[in-house]
Amino acid sequence: MLIDLNVLLEYTDWERQKWRESLRQRGDRILLTTTGANSDARFETVGDLVRHIFSAEKRYVERLSDQPLTDTASLPTENIEVLFKFGQESRKALREFIDTLPAEEWDKPRDYTMGNHPLRATPKKFIIHVLLHEVRHWAQISTLLRQNGIKGDLHDFLFSPALGGDARLEQTKA
């Protein structure tokens, strides 16, 4: 059984909404939380990671569409609303790409250069990668915030509305 891309889209849409609400409650300063001394030098703050999530999505769609890559370096990383508005734009572009790519193109390998590395991959693999990439970075952000004493919410797939179900999060009395 293959996972439908719509399931991953629904889950990551839900994740974004939960993160936007959670970050808003704490204010823009939360984005300045450091990623720590041993982190990837490209990302010094939580805001840098959020920008990276949305920037990667945007640029992967641009690669797949043979468009020039957007330079997002000037996108501020300390403003929740600006970042998540950009995230809405990147998600819209991803959905448009998915909706318009002809079915016969999904599994056709294409050649790309990622940094200095040649890569051969199908559009399907790129799209799955972009969605899993996002999930991985939200988990990283959750860990960073916990390490800085900031408790988070449940973001597990099991508790999301994806694939239905009824997550009952209120505590039961024994």
Image: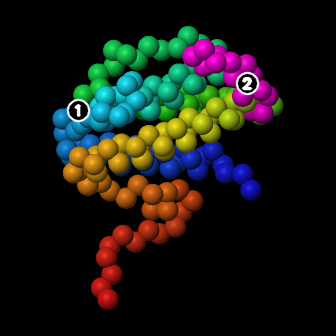
Q: Quadrant of residue 99?
A: top right
Q: Residue at x 53, y 56 (%)?
A: 162
Farthest residue to the front: give it.
Answer: 38
Query: Of residues 106 and 47, which is closer to you in this image?
Result: 47
Task: Name above or below for residue 72 compared with residue 101.
Answer: above
One can see residue 161 in this view = no
Q: Quadrant of residue 5?
A: top right
Q: Residue at x 52, y 67 (%)?
A: 165
**Would residue 105 appear left or right of 48 to someone viewing this image?**
right
Reading the image, the residue beneath label 2 is 120
User: Would you say residue 111 sits in the magenta stretch?
Assistant: yes
* The magenta segment: 106-121
Instruction: State whether the magenta stretch is mostly helix, strand or loop.
Output: strand
Measured from the top left, where is residue 10 in percent x and y? Answer: 52, 48
Reading the image, the residue beneath label 1 is 32
User: Would you say residue 50 sits in the magenta stretch?
Assistant: no
- Give the quadrant of the C terminus: bottom left
**Would residue 133 appear left or right of 47 to someone viewing this image?**
right
